């Protein structure tokens, strides 16, 4: 009977939401576009997913590739240079090209594309 109750209790526990990671890798020497990619990406996450950010279900982190931590994370995710990647569980989306294309003149596009990428990876 105890096993049945334990099983029933386990079945009623909520399934944890996937943790969503958006990582931006850059170098110490950064131009205007690099800075705009970081700002637009951070702003998009905070605007689109404030509750998930507050609950630590969505994390945006910027890594400097010239620093030890940034180099280690780049190796872990097989990143070779300036990169914006979205990671949900074992799925990844590379948003680098899109972000650099829109960062200076249309930063709102980064939020639109991020939202689509999140939806696609959650399927």
Image: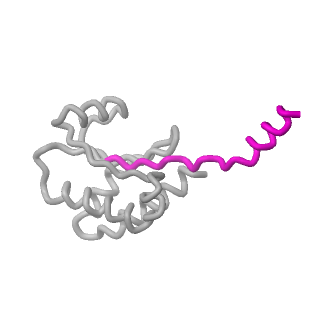
Residue extending farthest to the left is: 29
Image position of 23 with respect to 2: above or below:
below
- For residue 95, side relative to residue 82 (left or right): right
Q: Nearer the viewer, residue 14 or 35?
A: 14
- For residue 7, side relative to residue 84 (left or right): right
Q: Position of residue 9 (x, y in %)?
A: 76, 43
Q: Nearer the viewer, residue 46 or 92?
A: 46
Residue extending farthest to the front is: 2
Would residue 36 be counted in the magenta stretch? no
Q: Position of residue 30 (x, y in %)?
A: 13, 50
For the point 35% across and 52% down, the residue is 60
Q: Nearer the viewer, residue 10 or 27?
A: 10
- All told, the count of numbered labels is 0
Q: Position of residue 71 (x, y in %)?
A: 24, 32
For the point 60% across and 47% down, the residue is 16
Would residue 7 be counted in the magenta stretch? yes
Image position of 29 with respect to 118: above or below:
above
For the point 43% across and 59% down, the residue is 54
Residue extending farthest to the right is: 1
Image position of 37 with respect to 70: above or below:
below
When asked about the image quadrant of residue 42, the answer is bottom left
When asked about the image quadrant of residue 112, the answer is bottom left
Q: Position of residue 13 (x, y in %)?
A: 69, 47
For the point 31% across and 36% down, the residue is 79
Residue numbers of the magenta segment: 1-23
The image quadrant where one finds the N terminus is top right
Question: How is the model colour-coded?
Answer: one colour
């Amino acid at each position: 009977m105890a096993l049945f109750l334990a099983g029933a209790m386990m079945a009623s526990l909520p399934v944890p939401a996937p943790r969503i990671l958006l990582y931006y890798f850059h170098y110490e020497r950064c131009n205007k576009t690099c800075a705009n990619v970081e700002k637009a990406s951070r702003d998009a996450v905070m605007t689109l997913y404030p509750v998930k950010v507050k609950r630590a279900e969505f994390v945006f982190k910027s890594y400097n590739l010239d620093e030890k931590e940034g180099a280690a994370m780049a190796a872990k995710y097989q990143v070779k240079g300036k990169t914006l990647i979205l990671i949900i569980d074992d799925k990844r989306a590379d948003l680098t090209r899109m972000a650099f294309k829109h960062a200076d003149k249309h930063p709102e596009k980064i939020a639109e594309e991020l939202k689509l990428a999140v939806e696609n990876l959650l399927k």
